[in-house]
Image (cartoon, rainbow, N blue to C red):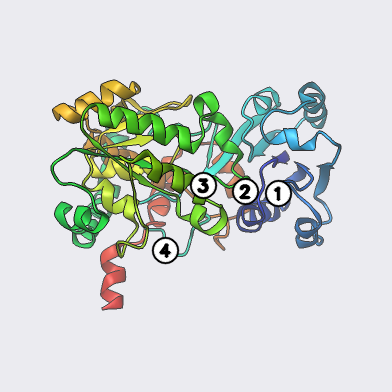
């Protein structure tokens, strides 16, 4: 078998925590090629990554360093030439980390994207590098049709973890009055949350945001819609933006709008986005993993995206209509039974840990080539840590 790792948006963390472990494992069972651009905006493969793999003599590296290499992240200038090159390699399997979804569609073999699998409100402990393979991007809540027997098995497997998760968050998140009071939110108006996404220059996936709207434009549009129905727009920023992105101009612009409330992340002893999702009347989403927390908590959702949302999420796509429903108290909530089943499917069937000592190259290939496999469901649910067990140890 011939495997191609196509990695235009490989960050140093992703390379160390995900790609190198997978390259090492698959190199023991297949001919492995790596195709990536030279470093740019904290993505690509350079000397540091090659040194980490210097002992892998059989892996063949192709690093594109021509003047157009930055374009590989989202829309290659020489797309036809790139596709021809990959067709010449003739891989049986292509594992991608790319914000460009169009180009890999023309690659030969089985093509899978590697995406993050860690999603609140569940806990994976010290395994933040858990991922899954998918044939598209940001298909929120989507799963294949299950037989009655398969659905019942998934339901049974996730049930104890689901109850444990709910009990944890019921005990951890204060009541609405306490949360709203700590964050300075009025109690007499409906509240809608806008959680901003990671805005570092390395996040090329933001290229898929419809109309290319900036965060300031998103907040302004949402603020106007909220004000029109007498709702409060609550804005939280991604925690990594606080660490790595200059957000002062944006935060000043939000404050200048007057009506939105920008949340101070230090105002609560837990992540404000999670605490708010337990109590707000709705949430505005794009391609954030926050949809999963909203689904678990039963929070009505609006989504602006070019990607698929499962029907059970009951995602609204019209912004004024969503705010009108929020004001009327008629906004559709996700189907909680379907949410529980999807979480069960996601962790039982999809998620895996690239640095798991028990993971072999053959298992990686099997996951990519056989995306649905009930034989791995029990082991998959083993990734989830029970909050109750951890809290008992800490007591």
Whole-angstrom CA distance, mark 2 to mark 3, is 49 Å
* Residue ID for mark 3: 249
Residue 8 horizontal side relative to residue 291, left or right:
right
Whole-angstrom CA distance, mark 1 to mark 4, is 30 Å
Residue at the far bottom: name it. 395
Single out the mark in the foreground, 1 or 3: 3
Residue drawn at 75 percent across, 37 percent down: 70
Residue 284 is situated, as x and y percent measured from the top left of the image, at: 35, 35
Residue drawn at 17 percent across, 39 percent down: 189
Single out the mark in the foreground, 1 or 4: 4
Q: Along the polypeptide, which appears first: circle 1 or circle 4? A: 1
Q: Along the polypeptide, which appears first: circle 2 or circle 3? A: 3
Closer to the camera, 126 or 261?
261
- Circles 1 and 4, Cβ within 8 Å, touching? The answer is no
* Residue ID for mark 2: 362
Residue 8 horizontal side relative to residue 307, left or right:
right
Any part of residue 142 in sight: no
Whole-angstrom CA distance, mark 1 to mark 2, is 7 Å
Single out the mark in the foreground, 2 or 3: 3
Residue 40 is situated, as x and y percent measured from the top left of the image, at: 74, 46
């Amino acid at each position: 078998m011939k495997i191609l790792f196509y990695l235009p948006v490989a960050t140093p963390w992703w390379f160390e925590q995900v790609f190198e472990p997978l390259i090492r494992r698959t190199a023991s069972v297949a001919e492995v090629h790596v195709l990536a651009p030279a470093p740019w905006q904290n993505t690509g493969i350079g000397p540091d990554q090659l040194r980490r793999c210097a002992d892998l003599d059989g892996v063949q590296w192709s690093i594109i360093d021509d003047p157009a290499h930055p374009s590989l992240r989202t829309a290659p200038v020489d797309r036809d030439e790139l596709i021809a090159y990959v067709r010449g390699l003739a891989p049986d399997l292509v594992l991608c980390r790319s914000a460009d979804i169009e180009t890999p569609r023309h690659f030969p073999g089985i093509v899978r994207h590697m995406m993050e699998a860690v999603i609140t409100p569940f806990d994976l402990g010290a395994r933040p590098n858990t991922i899954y393979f998918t044939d598209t991007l940001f298909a929120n809540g989507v799963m294949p049709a299950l037989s009655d027997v398969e659905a019942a098995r998934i339901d049974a497997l996730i049930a104890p973890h689901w109850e444990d998760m709910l009990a944890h968050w019921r005990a951890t998140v204060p009541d609405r009055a306490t949360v709203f009071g700590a964050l300075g939110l009025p109690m007499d108006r409906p509240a809608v949350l806008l959680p901003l996404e990671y805005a570092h220059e390395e996040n090329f996936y933001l290229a898929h945001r419809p109309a290319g709207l900036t965060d300031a434009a998103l907040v302004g549009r949402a603020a106007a819609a909220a004000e029109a129905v007498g709702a409060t727009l609550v804005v939280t920023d991604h925690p990594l933006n606080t660490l790595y992105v200059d957000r002062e101009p944006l935060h000043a612009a939000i404050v200048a709008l007057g009506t939105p409330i920008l949340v101070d992340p230090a105002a609560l002893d837990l992540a404000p986005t999670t605490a708010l999702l337990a109590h707000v009347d709705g949430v505005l989403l794009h391609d954030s993993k926050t949809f999963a927390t909203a689904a678990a908590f039963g929070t009505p959702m609006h989504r602006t995206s070019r990607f698929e949302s499962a029907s059970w999420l009951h995602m609204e796509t019209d912004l004024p209509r969503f705010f009108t429903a929020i004001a009327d108290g008629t906004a559709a909530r996700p189907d909680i039974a379907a949410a529980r089943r999807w979480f069960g499917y996601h962790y039982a069937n999809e998620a895996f840990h690239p640095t798991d000592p028990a993971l072999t190259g053959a298992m990686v290939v099997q996951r990519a080539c056989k995306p649905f496999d009930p034989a791995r469901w029990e082991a998959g649910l083993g990734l989830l840590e029970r909050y109750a067990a951890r809290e008992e140890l800490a007591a």
